[in-house]
Amino acid sequence: MSSPRSSSLLAWPAAKPSRAGRPAVSPEERRRTRLKRKLKENLTAYGLLCAALVVFALFSWYPIVRGVLLSFQQVDFVNAPTWVGFGNFTRLFEDPLFGVAWRNTLLFTGLALVFGFAVPFLTAVLLNELRHAKAFFRLAVYLPVMLPPVVTALMWKWFYDPGPGLFNSALGAAGLPGGQWLDSSTTAMLSLVFVSTWANMGSTTLIYLAALGTIPGELYEAAELDGAGLWKRLRHVTFPQTRFVLLVLLLLQIVATMQVFTEPYVMTGGGPDDSTVTVLLLLYRYAFVYNDFGSASAMSLLLFVALGVFSAWYVRLTRKADQS
Amino acid sequence: MSSTWSRTVSRRTLCLLAAGGLALSLTSCGDGESTPAGGKVKITVTGQPPTSQPFERSVFDADVKEFEASHPNIQIEPHEGFMDPKTFSAKLAGGQLEDVYYVYFTDPAQIIARHQAADITEAAKSVPHVNDLKPELLDNFRDAGGKLYGLPTMNYTMGLLYSRPLFQKAGLDPDKPPQTWDEVREAAKKISALGNGVVGYADYSKNNQGGWHMTGWLYSMGGDIARKDGDKWVADFANEKGKQALQYLHDMRWTDNSMGAKQLLEAQDVQRMMGAGQLGMYMAAPDNVPVLVKQFNGKYEDYGIAGMPGGQGTLLGGEGYMLNPKASPEKIKAGLEWIQWKYLNPDRFEKHIRQYADGKQPVGLPAEPTPDIWTGAVREQQLTLKAKYANVPAKNFQSYVDTTSKIKGSIEPPDAQQIYAALDSVMQAVLTDQNANLDQQLSSAASKVNSVLAQVK
């Protein structure tokens, strides 16, 4: 026997009695009225959102969809596109530079992580430790971000000039031999990584600083009372407390550095000896030097898929780590 | 509820995508302008010099007015600028490509293969003096079947540009420029021995220009970049000729130290060095001289051009005009009339040369105001007129003129820009790595170039 309470729960809910002789309103109708009211209240917001969606559709989604289609087509913009299946991909795989570009890009990303991830973090920790002139040093670290990327690249090109460039002049003044920097295939990529790190570390440092600012001071005080030195404080307080920001920035940095273009385009043109040809630089060549938009789109699709798979894998991994 | 929402959203997204696509395709339906029967034919043309070149701009604008006056049925809408490969396809796709558009000699083969130019084989038959043009220049605008898709309007032949003051300082006779690569090497050594950062010889190795100049080196030594093997093109430089060219560069760079430490150079870098009086020689065409004089306040007397060293061949390049394949037959006819009247018109040689002379522009160089695209009587007529109005020391360029008429000129290889991109890395390796393995560089570049040539139709 079920209790009256449980029986009433199990029973199909009866329509509530209508008030003061008004006809009964069905739940469907009530939902519709509520929806109408909500729509009316949010009309302006929807209008503005629609405008944004149209802009997105025209300038972001449509090109993405078109890009995917183009990957499987050959176009001359005069006749209708012809479907070539995986022909564009085959062309890419047959290009000896294709593997070189991926290898160089991964090398750039790896080196950029070593420098671009560690240097800003250490800078942020040092800035956080400062007692005086904090604002000045923050501004000083952030200033390079304000320079347009091409200006930064051209400026560093002069720094690296093996003739009268800044670095070799300074080394020469100190009686040391100069380097070939961008003019040697062994040092060119590393030289580009320095430029990229220098140009972008300001914003990363600021994000780290913000994350460091959220760590409660008591934790450090407690650690200090327990006799923890700088390294132990970093290991047991700073790292665990900023872990989330570190992980997100790591992902963003990998995605961004895999798309490196400005530095090799402006400073080396992919040389010397193809040592700085990156995926995006090769993609650019396919599109705007070879005018082969199909292969260029195929290349961008490959990069998109690679980064998408990596991001999904990364998010899954970090979620697992969080749960454990 | 959530599934309804996402269905709605995806439906909306699709609608928006469709609307976006429709909007884009509507904007890309060409200029939508038809020629009214019996009315004026309006054509858009490129090639109007920018306002930063006031003299050239004024000449162009005056020519437009004069043409319209003598051709009342044609209206010209000039567009600033020349060929920009970065925007070419986008303009074509968006219906914004001009009816008459400018091209470099490196591009017609690809443009023709992609059907992006109108077939003018029949229409060009009525163009006066078309048969007086150098046939190899016209060939640059033909497909494999012999159909014509454009007309050449400017031509250059590669030579050796040198600084006369630096030659004098180094104890060299500027009136007897080097004729062989051995002589170039010796002269470069003497010039770089002047010190103070002076470089004897410089060469490009970036942004496809390295490959372009490597082609020049190969041609000068009797070599080639690509040859026809049956109905297919194959790379033809991984051989002794190729190695010989690279060996010269390598030795000048590393044994003689006469090429300076800074590499990965392109045209502007080298012109800047020459303009600043820091460079002795570089491979170039005569059109570089006005650039050096105008941009660096130099003097025409300070520069000389010798024929291509080696004497076995040289690179021919240049530019011309092609017509939009979407243009109507009336527009194509009007476009051809404009090209002929403005660029290929012996009747206007004298007036054009006088315009330059009156405007204190250089006359007598083997380049502007009338380029070296002619043969036979028309060429003679042009040379006589140029000599009559010459205002630059023609003797500084005599060696170039004498040599170019004697040595073989070869046009650029098919799909030139892609090949040049592949050859850049060879030039870079030679100029930046003392221990570069030349054979390995050549064979690796040959495999890259063969992959490019496999696409040539």
Image: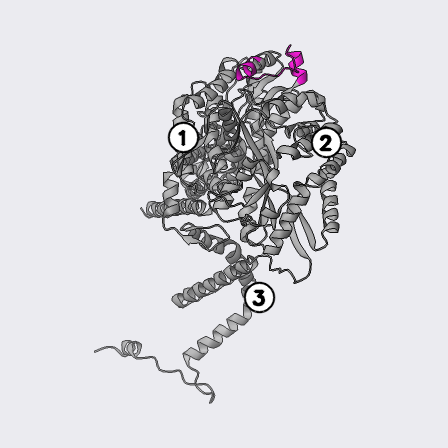
Residue furthest right in the image: B358
- Dot 1, how many residues are within 10 Å of its Cα: few (below 14), some (14-19), or many (20+)? many
Circle 2/circle 3 CB separation < 8 Å: no
Q: Measure how far apart labels 3 and 1 are at the Cα level.
A: 63 Å
Q: Residue at x 66, y 20 (%)?
A: B277
Q: Which residues are magenta?
A: B164-186
Secondary structure under the numbered disc 2 in the rendered image? helix
Mark seen at residue A44: 3
Secondary structure under the numbered disc 1 in the rendered image? helix
Residue furthest bottom in the image: A21
Residue A94: x percent and y percent?
Answer: 36, 39
Secondary structure under the numbered disc 3 in the rendered image? helix
Label 3 chain ID: A
Is the residue A80 above or below the residue B176 in the image?
A: below
Position of the N terminus of chain B by quadrant: bottom left
Q: Is residue B165 magenta?
A: yes
Residue furthest left in the image: A1
Dot 3 and dot 1 within a common chain: no
| Residue under pointer 1 | B446
Residue B339: x percent and y percent?
Answer: 64, 45
Position of the C terminus of chain B by quadrant: top left
| Residue under pointer 2 | B385
Q: Measure how far apart labels 1 and 2 are at the Cα level.
A: 46 Å
